[in-house]
Image (cartoon, rainbow, N blue to C red):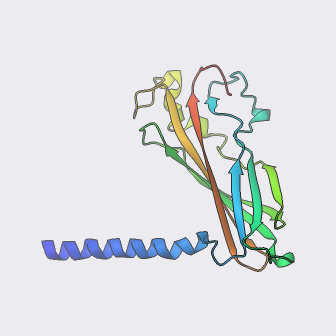
Amino acid sequence: MDKTMKNRWIASAVAMVALLGLSCSSELANSGSSVHLLVTNQQARQQIDIEPEAAGCDPANTSIAPIRLQALPKNDTVTGAFTQVRITRYRVSYVRTDGGRATPTGFVRSTDTLLDVGGAATGTNLVVLQPDARNQAPFAALLPNNGGRDPDTGRSVVQLDVIVEVFGETLAGDNVYGATRFPLTFCYHCNGCF
């Protein structure tokens, strides 16, 4: 393949990716909706000790950051049942903040919550970390039998941001979207969860 042909192919591929990105963004747009979805968190823990039975890490009390969902009207004339918001799914992803590359695998889960406009669901317990994630990359490297250090950073901790994106629609059929983000530090034998 000559250089001109290769450059055209690359330009076409970039254009297709850009168009795909624009077409997917309509799912995230709240502009056509009369309701705005506000998603916030009440972070309860900043550090997760992955050592089995670490202090404060009781599996029965694994609340890391209860999520609060609130449906807010965009103007004063929003009324009626069709402006209620049904939350249908959420997506969890991760971004390393410590310079490392490996992240836990993100996931999407279905849910079903109905919010009144002006109402809120507080303490919504959305799973933000899969139960088996502690035994997979990047956390598995922190285990003593695996060296106890993250191979990307050489540190004994992994720091990342958890991103929770919530999707739904008004009962009138308008898409709504909201997201929240919070930091977590993972370690092994580091004084428990707090």
**Is any atom of residue 1 visible in this view?**
no
Across and down, in percent, residue 126 comes to 73, 50
Seen in the image, is 15 located left or right of residue 177? Answer: left
Across and down, in percent, residue 68 comes to 75, 52
* Residue in front for this viewpoint, 28 or 145: 28
Q: Determine whether 137 is above or below 127 in the image.
A: above
Q: Determine whether 74 is above or below 154 in the image.
A: below
Residue plotted at (65% across, 61% down) = 178
Residue plotted at (66% across, 46% down) = 128
Q: Determine whether 133 is above or below 164 in the image.
A: above
Seen in the image, is 106 located left or right of residue 66? Answer: left
Residue plotted at (84% across, 61% down) = 119
Across and down, in percent, residue 158 comes to 51, 33
Across and down, in percent, residue 63 comes to 74, 39
Q: Which quadrant, please, contains the N terminus?
A: bottom left
Residue furthest to the front in view is 76
Residue 5: quadrant of the picture? bottom left
Q: Determine whether 87 is above or below 188 in the image.
A: below
* Residue in front for this viewpoint, 161 or 58: 161
**Is any atom of residue 85 visible in this view?**
yes
Q: Which quadrant, please, contains the C terminus?
A: top right
